[in-house]
Amino acid sequence: MHFLPGTKTADSHWQFRIYSPATEMSSRQTRGIILRLTGHGESDKIVTLYSPDLGRVTGIAKGAYRSKKRFVNKLELFSLLDITYRPPRTGGLIFLNEAELENPFLTLRSRHNRYTTASLACELIMRFTGEHDPDPEIFAILLWLLESVNQGNQPLKTGALFHLRLLKSCGYQPDLGRCCSCKIRVNNTRSFALQPATGSLICNRCNSNVNTSGFFLSLQTIKFLQAAQQLHINQLQRLQMSEKSAREALQILYRYSQHLLQRDIHSWKFVLEDSTLKGEKNPAAKKRGPAL
Ligand SMILES: [Zn+2]
């Protein structure tokens, strides 16, 4: 370690930057979307991000509340950042040196139905991905959701499409082509339900309880989801879907995911509650909301 040449400040004090080859060489850069944010002590923040290079990682931003240059107004929920970080020596938290704001997605924090949908997406990423297990496809679909909802696309439909594509990326894509028992293709002469244990459809003739199981899907919703499984993410918003179908799709995907995860998904109920309210409200004005 040695001192680099100094510079003189306005009050005639010399400032020196401490140069450490090991520190400089180990600093790295990546992009990341903030999934969760908590305070730590008086001035630090603990930040959980999803990065295309690192996957889901948690880091500490030292002095986050004080450092205007490095962090202020940058470390906010859902923000897309370029971060400079130092990896941990052994497991543990990464050390965030600095963050540059690439996109704050401001409307996601100011309009309630957008906020709840973005919160659901972040919770699903938290639950379905492991730490330090990067998947650029998962980063891309999360970024797509945040951009789409921020631009004003229908939150419920976008949330359902995101959920379906996340399941695909994680290897849990539901089989929506035919009845898993009699193999008949999906058609309008029978009713079909998604079996949460297998992620496959079963028709009403093979399962007499299909209409009471709560997993029934209309033909329109099945066709929509089939198309959504095939399209490139840049084409997903071309799909037309009624709000009723979007709610139905979200509900079935929620129950399927609940079974896969063996736990509840807290943000989900806020998304559906919110979709019944008229207009968009500021989340700060609402007493209850998802806690990630
Ligand atoms: Zn059947």
Image (spheres, rainbow, N blue to C red):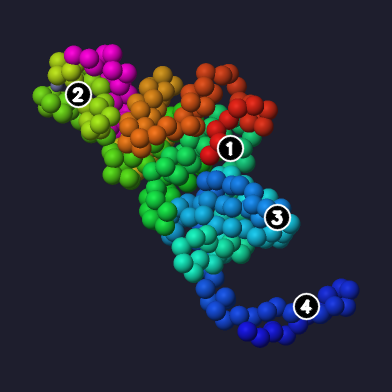
Cα–Cα span, label 2 and label 4? 71 Å
Q: Is residue 127 left or right of residue 42?
A: left
- The quarter of the image that holds ligand 1 is top left
| Type of amino acid at the residue the image marks with label 4 | Gln
* Mark closer to the observer (4, 1): 4
Q: Quadrant of residue 83?
A: bottom right
In the rendering, at what x and y percent does residue 160 appear?
A: 40, 31
Q: Is residue 221 magenta?
A: yes
| Pointer 2 or 1: first along the chain | 1
- Which segment did they paint magenta? 208-227
The residue singled out by tag 3 in the image is: 43
Q: Which residue is mark 2?
A: 202
The residue to which callout 1 is attached is 108
Compute the Cα span from label 4 to label 3: 23 Å
Cα–Cα span, label 2 and label 1 = 38 Å
Per the model, the C-alpha gap separating discs 3 and 2 is 54 Å
Q: Taking 104 as reference, is 250 above or below it?
A: above
N-terminal label among 4 and 3: 4
